[in-house]
Image: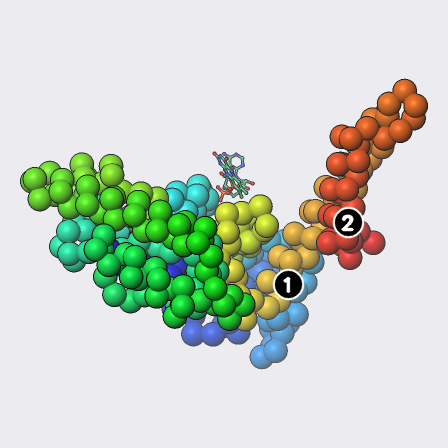
Amino acid sequence: MFLVRPTATFEPVGFSSSKEVYQFIEKIGRTCYKSESGITDNSSTEFVKMILMRGHLSVLEHVSLTARIILDRGISHELVRHRLASYSQESTRYCNYKKDGNLIFVAPHWLLSMLNSLPLEEITFKNVDTIVSRMRTEYFTKNKTHISNKEKERIIDFLNICMQSELYYLKQVDAGHKPEDARGGLVHHIKTEIVMTANLRNWLHVFSLRTSKFAHPDMREIMNMLYSNFMFNFPTVAQFSEMERGKKLADLIVNSKKQISMCNFKDKYGNDLEDNRVISDLFKTLSQEYGEYLS
Ligand SMILES: Cc1cc2nc3c(=O)[nH]c(=O)nc-3n(C[C@H](O)[C@H](O)[C@H](O)COP(=O)(O)OP(=O)(O)OC[C@H]3O[C@@H](n4cnc5c(N)ncnc54)[C@H](O)[C@@H]3O)c2cc1C
């Protein structure tokens, strides 16, 4: 087996620059106001800002971005729940992983957080101890100078389950079974490649759900890669999404606070009950983090 990092990049399709994208959005958007005569060399960014501020978001749906993502198959199941997008994914029915000799698994976030780099060589039951021992000394992160025994055990357990999965798969295929039948033994960590196309409006929606702290850390890792690329290329649109996310949370805090204030979680002596304190603490934390959006 081999271990790889997750990766995510946008594919270059259609437009050669973000300016061209904004100009295209402007051209479409001005249809609504019949104000095409207002188009100049530099008018597109301001126009895009204007439609975003008004919530005239359907105009963003005319531009789509395509991302190529390598991730673990478990996380890909979460990704494809986004219905307003198109997907093409490596098939575990038609791709025979035995062809390459080794199965590839994606290193999870907790392992990546311990290591500077991944071992490039094949990992087998025979050399797993040596590789993990080397990980403890050679690959530790800048913030970490040592991997504890407990962490070592976690890494070995992870590598073992991937290798067991590989062993089962290869045995099934060697026995003449089809990949579509052998795939039942593959663990969620198996690497998959997926191409996802969505329009700009839906990317904003996906980013807001999947870069949040409630998203799975492995999903967040993928989406942060795409989001930083998106922010670099489309700062005007990206800033808007940050603002919207903040505003939604602010609404949530304000509304929930109102509802909570109508409840009376007190004991007979007038003291706050535990539930009340827990909820107040939660809102305090949320307010501290998102307070700038509350004014
Ligand atoms: C942190 C987190 C935890 C999650 N946990 C679970 C879980 O435990 N179990 C689980 O099953 N799922 C879970 N999900 C998946 C989640 O319920 C959504 O299916 C997924 O995030 C896709 O989001 P979406 O429907 O907004 O996006 P899309 O499917 O891309 O839709 C985009 C938007 O279009 C609109 N839309 C699309 N279809 C409809 C429709 N039929 N009716 C009305 N409006 C529609 C909605 O406004 C929607 O937000 C989780 C998601 C997150 C982010």
Residue contact at pointers 2 and 1, CB within 8 angstroms:
no
Side of 266 relative to 102 (left or right): right
Side of 174 relative to 102 (left or right): left
Q: Is mark 1 within 8 Å of ligand 1?
A: no
Side of 22 relative to 11 (left or right): right
Foreground of the two, 292 or 6 = 6
Q: Amino acid at mark 2?
A: Ser
Q: Residue 259: x and y, percent?
A: 80, 31
Q: Secondary structure at mark 2?
A: helix
Q: Is mark 2 within 8 Å of ligand 1?
A: no
The quadrant of the image that shows the N terminus is: bottom left
Q: Residue 251: x and y, percent?
A: 74, 44
> Which residue is pictured at 19% across the width and 45% down the height?
167
- Of labels 2 and 1, earlier in sequence is 1
Q: Secondary structure at mark 1?
A: helix
* Res. 32 image quadrant: bottom right
**For mark 1, what is the residue?**
239
Specify how the rendered protein is coloured: rainbow
**For mark 2, what is the residue?**
287
Visible residue check, residue 106: yes
Give the CA separation, mark 2 to mark 1.
Answer: 20 Å
Q: Amino acid at mark 1?
A: Gln
* Res. 43 image quadrant: bottom right
Foreground of the two, 172 or 212 = 172
Residue at the far bottom in the pictured view: 41
> Which residue is pictured at 61% across the width and 78% down the height?
42
